[in-house]
Amino acid sequence: MNIIKKTVIRNIKTIFDSFAKQNGFTFLKPLVLIRIQNDILHIISFDLSSGGFTCDVAVQPLFVPSNNLVLSFGNRISRLGVCMPERWTYGDSEASIIKGLEEIRDLMTENGLDWFKCLNHPEGIVEYIESGKVADPQYIVAFAPHLRWLYLGFCYLWLGEMVKARMSLEELEKHLQNDQRPWVVQLRQLGKDYSIMAEQNPKQIPEKLDENMFLTKKQIGVK
């Protein structure tokens, strides 16, 4: 890691330490802050490239099986309700880096926290998807179509709305039916299994979702 990136990481820790404590976030990694509300993981993720640094916000339902952090339900903080260049340059001094990180912290305070508040419960995720906000780049960028049905299905399972859950998971199967890539086949089977469970043994759903959360948190290193 070069000295510039080390400088950015050091300043992220310094500038975001107070913000994190005030808002219930912790550092999962030097470039990733997280918090959990109502089984939804809130993620702040920095990316450092040769051209500068960016910051993403995202939410991830922990009861949806996953082996890693998923940033798909999210946006650049520089595009969330504003229209700014998505990347901050390193500039020619540490002061430039500090200025950029302070701008990100301020955007997080002004826009990011309200966005997270709307998505701090499975009902919020359902509302975002059903209302079409996931297709509006002011709120969400590049939300994969299959995730619409996956997240809807599992959020409805969490909410105990089994009929809507089954409808969403059946749509997931239809959307993926012609794709034979191994991970897609596995995902299609996941939807089918939970759709059957919702119909035949709905009382088992809460236990299975708890198992999913335990395994997902273990895989991504969340305590």
Image (cartoon, rainbow, N blue to C red):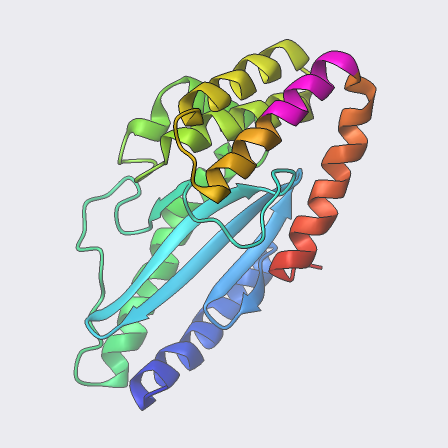
Residue 139, x across and y down, in percent: 33, 35
In front: 64, or 75?
64
Q: Give the percent coordinates (x, y) of residue 129.
A: 43, 24
Q: Quadrant of residue 167?
A: top right
Between 21 and 61, which is closer to the camera in this rendering? 61
Res 1 visible:
yes
Image position of 218 with respect to 94: above or below: above
| Residue sitting nearer the eye, 81 or 158 | 158
| Viewer-nearest residue: 177 or 100 | 177
Q: Please indicate whether residue 5 sits to the left or right of residue 186 in the image.
A: left
In this picture, residue 148 sits left or right of residue 204: left
Residue 194 is inside the magenta segment = yes
Furthest-top residue in this view: 163
Kindly report the secondary structure that dominates the magenta region of the rendered protein: helix
Residue 23 visible within the image = no
Query: In the displayed structure, does residue 118 sit left or right of residue 178?
Result: right
Picture quarter containing residue 123?
A: top right
- Quadrant in which the C terminus is drawn: bottom right
Say if 6 sits above or below 39 in the image.
below
Q: Quadrant of residue 206?
A: top right
* Vertical arrangement, residue 204 with respect to residue 170, above or below: below
Query: Measured from the top left, where is residue 116 in percent x and y?
Result: 49, 41
**What count of labels does the image hold?**
0
Pick out the residue farthest to the front: 180
The image shows residue 183 at horizontal and vertical percentages of 49, 43
**Residue at position x 36%, y 36% in the image:** 143
Note whether 145 is above or below 82 in the view shown: above
Q: Please report the residue visible at 73 percent of the width from the left and 20 percent of the height from the top.
A: 197
Start and end of the magenta stretch? 192-200
Q: Quadrant of the N terminus?
A: bottom left
